Image: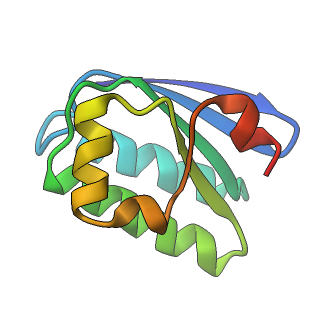
């Protein structure tokens, strides 16, 4: 998995590309988010437009990151979800705890 970072004011946007599975991106994402938290970045937008699939290890990384950032008063938004990823989050009912938005503009406005 590849991660490209962009910033807009106090918001950090991460463009994720590739599968998010055990051994294929889960640790990369965890390390990136931990680094951003240590830098004081508390509002993250994860662009998942190019993430066709994620497994339970990736979901665990997202939930762990959300817990860390919420403790600091921050937020994580997930945007541009592929149908398979969106369905997985809905089945796990995680779409209700994350800020799921249709696009970056909507996430930035919250």
Query: Is 70 placed left or right of 64 in the picture?
Result: right
Q: Residue at x 24, y 25 (%)?
A: 52
Residue that sits furthest to the right in the current view: 9
Of the pair 107 and 17, the residue shown nearer to us? 107
Give the vertical position of 30 relative to 53 (above or below): below
**Residue 59 drawn at (x, y percent):** 27, 56
Give the vertical position of 105 relative to 36 (above or below): above
Q: Quadrant of the N terminus?
A: top left
Residue 103: quadrant of the picture: top right
Q: Residue at x 36, y 64 (%)?
A: 94
Query: Is 11 placed left or right of 49 in the picture?
Result: right
Q: Residue at x 22, y 34 (%)?
A: 84
Residue 72: quadrant of the picture: bottom right
Q: Residue at x 77, y 40 (%)?
A: 108
Give the vertical position of 87 relative to 4 (above or below): below
**Residue 25 drawn at (x, y percent):** 25, 36
Query: Is 21 placed left or right of 13 in the picture?
Result: left
Of the pair 95 and 46, the residue shown nearer to us? 95
**Residue 38 drawn at (x, y percent):** 62, 59
Please state the total of marks drawn on the protein image: 0
**Residue 36 drawn at (x, y percent):** 60, 49
Of the pair 97 and 23, the residue shown nearer to us? 97
Q: How is the image coloured?
A: rainbow
């Amino acid at each position: 998995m590849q991660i490209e970072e962009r910033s807009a004011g106090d918001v950090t946007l991460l463009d994720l590309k590739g599968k998010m599975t055990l051994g294929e991106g889960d640790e990369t994402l965890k390390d990136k988010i931990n680094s951003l938290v240590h830098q004081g970045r508390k509002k993250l937008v994860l662009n998942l437009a190019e993430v066709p699939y994620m497994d339970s290890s990736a979901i665990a990384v997202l939930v762990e990151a959300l817990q860390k950032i919420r403790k600091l008063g921050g937020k994580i938004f997930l945007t541009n979800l592929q149908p398979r990823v969106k369905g997985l989050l809905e089945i796990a009912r995680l779409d209700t705890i994350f800020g799921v938005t249709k696009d970056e503009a909507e996430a930035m406005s919250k």
